Amino acid sequence: MIEDDKVISAQEAEFKELLDKDTFKISQIGEIVKGVVVSASKAEVRLDIDGIACGVVRGQELYFEAEEYANLKPGDEVEATVVEEENENGEMELSFKYAGQQKAWNTLIDAFENKKIIKVKINDANKGGLIVSYGQISGFLPVSQLSPENYPRVNGGDKAKILDKLKSFVGSEIEGRVMALDEKEEKLVISEKDAWQEKQKDIISKYKVGSIVDGTITALTDFGVFVSFNQNLEGLIHISELAWQRIDSPADLFKVGDIVKAEIISIDGSKIFLSAKKLLEDPWQGVEKKYKVGQQVTGTILKINPFGLFVELDKDIHGLAHISQLGLAHDQKINDLFKVGDQKEFTVVSVEPRDHRLGLSAVKIDKLGVKRSDKQSEQEISESNKKTAIKVDDKEIKIKKVVKEKKEKVVKEKVIKEKKEKLNIKDKE
């Protein structure tokens, strides 16, 4: 009897100790609880909560997108959010969805504050960029924030082709940094470029202005070519740095896949700017020995602008014939007298090797001593001379008329004076 009393006392003491510790606490709606999976299917998942309660996750509260909830099996420990303290079966109603969302926001906040790189899924694309998601949090990755290797470089900026390029990323995953985050506004903006810069900064630091690189042309644009070199680094050769002569389009000289050698002329963060022409001999050095002011030269018209003509003198040296040097009449237009591809005679009017400029004039002095452009015909000159002669004749007639009128006025005044003098004499007599 005494032994039985001791056993009962020990059990009471243990029970009292459990009560004193307050180990059992009823979870409130919105709280996250931990549980062990008892059973799992596509329809529902049952959890054992601390051995004192049973919870169930079902319907739309199931969340398989996150890896931790995708392949649950008995014995796995997992977190869930309480959405109902007790359902019709006396079980705790739970949600993986809310728990997953909160954990996703917590991870994004940590990534934003500590500049960590995260992986997001690309779900859709529009003209402005990519629609992405982290867990069930939707976000946006602007086109401008794509890494150099994924940036859609389309010659001519065709928006339809750019959109096609962006749509090709749908379904894939991409690494990026959180640029902007606001949980209340449900705003998430991702930058792949920032993550790319972080990965490449050690590689980029090995290069300096003046370094020579060999690379492959990956894209052609209206403003230049992009060159890939050494472990996915990429640089831009601007159209003005491709060659010493004037270029209308990079496609006239290069194509995607061409191997080029270039010199680094600027590094701005992850932006690397290159020059191909700096590795070529400057054809303008000593150009004043080849072309002199007053020299008559033959040139091919490459381009016509409102301010003048771009003229090719040889494959390296191009000159400009300003509109004021074309001998146009007041009613003539530049396109009426000159055509692209025409070969014409010009006069060199200025040579500036340091600035890579050479001025030309299409105005000449003909046999009659009249300035004319190479496009003017003899008939136009003849008509011009006739007009000039008529103007001279008219002027002479006007002069003669004025002289005659002055003479007549002098004679008239003289006659009047003589008459007055005669009258005065008679009065005195």
Image (spheres, grey):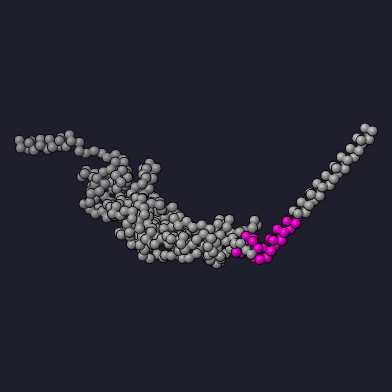
- Judging depth in this view, the residue of 72 and 427 nearest the camera is 427
Can residue 258 be seen here? yes
Q: Residue furthest top?
A: 428
In percent of the image, x 46 and y 65: which residue is there? 315
- Judging depth in this view, the residue of 6 and 280 nearest the camera is 280
Residue 7 sits in quarter: top left
Q: Residue furthest left?
A: 2
* Left or right of 247 in this view: 9: left
Percent coordinates x, y for residue 288 in the rendering: 46, 60
Judge whether 12 appears above or below 243 on screen. above
Name the quadrant of the C terminus.
Answer: top right
Can residue 164 be seen here? no
User: What secondary structure predominates along the stretch shown in magenta?
Assistant: helix
Specify the segment rendered in magenta.
368-394
In percent of the image, x 53 and y 65: which residue is there? 297
Name the quadrant of the N terminus.
Answer: top left
Percent coordinates x, y for residue 104 in the rendering: 31, 47
- Judging depth in this view, the residue of 31 and 223 nearest the camera is 223
* Left or right of 112 in this view: 420: right
In percent of the image, x 51 and y 59: which residue is there? 293
Verify whether residue 384 appears in magenta.
Answer: yes
Residue 81 sits in quarter: top left
Percent coordinates x, y for residue 243 in the rendering: 42, 61
Judge whether 108 appears above or below 339 on screen. above
The total number of labels drawn is 0
* Left or right of 102 in this view: 306: right
- Judging depth in this view, the residue of 303 and 381 nearest the camera is 381
Percent coordinates x, y for residue 178 in the rendering: 34, 47
Verify whether residue 293 appears in magenta.
Answer: no
